[in-house]
Amino acid sequence: MGGVMLARGPPGWVLRGARHLGEDRRRGVSMDCGQLPEGRSLRLPRRGRIFFREVAGPAGAPALLLLHGWLASATLNWRRVFAPLGERFHVIAPDLRGHGRGIRSLRRFQLEDCADDAAALLEGLGVESAIAVGYSMGGPVAQLLWRRHPSRVAGLVLCATSHRPVRGRPAGRLAFRSAFSAAAATTRVGQLANLANRQLQRFVLGRIDPRVGAPGRGYALLELWRHDPRMLLEAGAALGRYGADAWFASIDVPTAVVVTTRDRAILPEDQMGQALRIRGARVFCVDLGHAACADPGFEAALVPACLDVAARAAAAKPPPRRARERSRLVRRLDALLS
């Protein structure tokens, strides 16, 4: 088959590209993990090489940019929804920095860098704007993408996330991020990360579809092994620092909030609080916990949320025009205040 294993599904779908398939074969890991869209890499100028999966979707379909959660990858986070979303959208799902095959850098992990990477990826693919779909940590990345690159964001779908992911008083938040920063800096980071990886492996593998056999579990394990331990710990610290209270309510694009009602990591009331602060935001509930993305029931909430935002975005002002109007308003305010 020319080095590529084809999977049944829409045109353009494969289990693995030849280069990545060869890498996995050398590691002795089976590819029995369900249908996955083709994965490829793109070098972003002055940023690094980013890995992403893509489904072309129907001609002229709106673009979805899927942004995964902390400790996951595009494959682990979105594997169950690539097919249903790909029937209606042009789907782009990158591995974020330090996660899976995401960009590696000596720079300290910053959520802002992830947002800038996402904007550069859209530019590199010639995608003018997309609906940013953020899950858990991907929520702050999507929010920052809107704030830093408004012309690239046609709408937002925020899943199992919040504008302040680490809840609590300032002292508690400081302790959280300080602990992760210290762990990332210590010379024992490898030992700490190995311990964390063993716990994460049990967590993630226990939530894979039970119908998937040992080969599929091995593939998920490989995805976890690909993470960069230092950058994961720094990502935890970045989440502890993140808070968008000052500007979150100014989000001006069609938005949907997918609330995981049994979530213990990000409380449902915190997720609902987002919808109350964003004008016109709509809520879609799913009776699952923070690992909802691994459950077949997640599709029932995510797909309608994306369709809702896409319909409203099509009727709204195009993002470039909206961004120009915002820039003019800012200049006028600056002139009045100077």
Image (tube, helix red, strand yellow):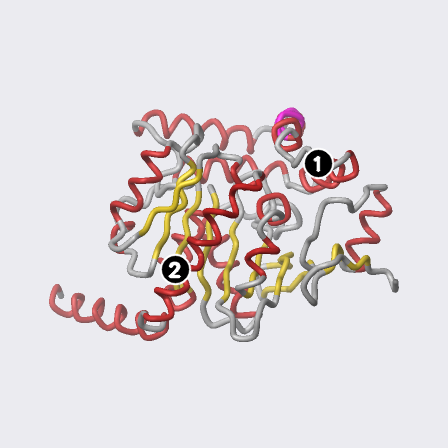
The amino acid marked with disc number 1 is Arg
The image shows residue 21 at horizontal and vertical percentages of 80, 53
Position of residue 38 measured from the top left corner of the image (x, y, whole percent): 69, 60
Determine the residue positioned at 52% across, 75% down. Answer: 60
What span is colored magenta in the figure?
195-200
- Dominant secondary structure, magenta: helix
Task: Report if residue 264 is visible in the image.
Answer: yes
Q: What residue is shown at x 47% (from left), y 34% (from top)? A: 288
Numbered-mark total: 2
Which residue type does callout 2 highlight? Val
Disc 2 packing (10 Å; few <14; some 14–19; many ≥20): many
Q: Check disc 2 and report the residue beneath it.
A: 309
Distance CA(mark 2)–CA(mark 1): 33 Å
Q: Which mark is residue 236?
A: none
**In the structure shown, which secondary structural element does the residue marked by tag 1 occupy?**
loop
User: To which residue does mark 1 refer?
Assistant: 211
From the viewer's side, name the closer residue of 80 and 133: 80
Secondary element type, mark 2: helix
Q: Is residue 104 left or right of residue 137?
A: right
Q: Badge 1 local density, few (<14 within 10 Å), some, or many (20+)?
A: few
Decide which of 303, 143 is in the foreground and name it.
303
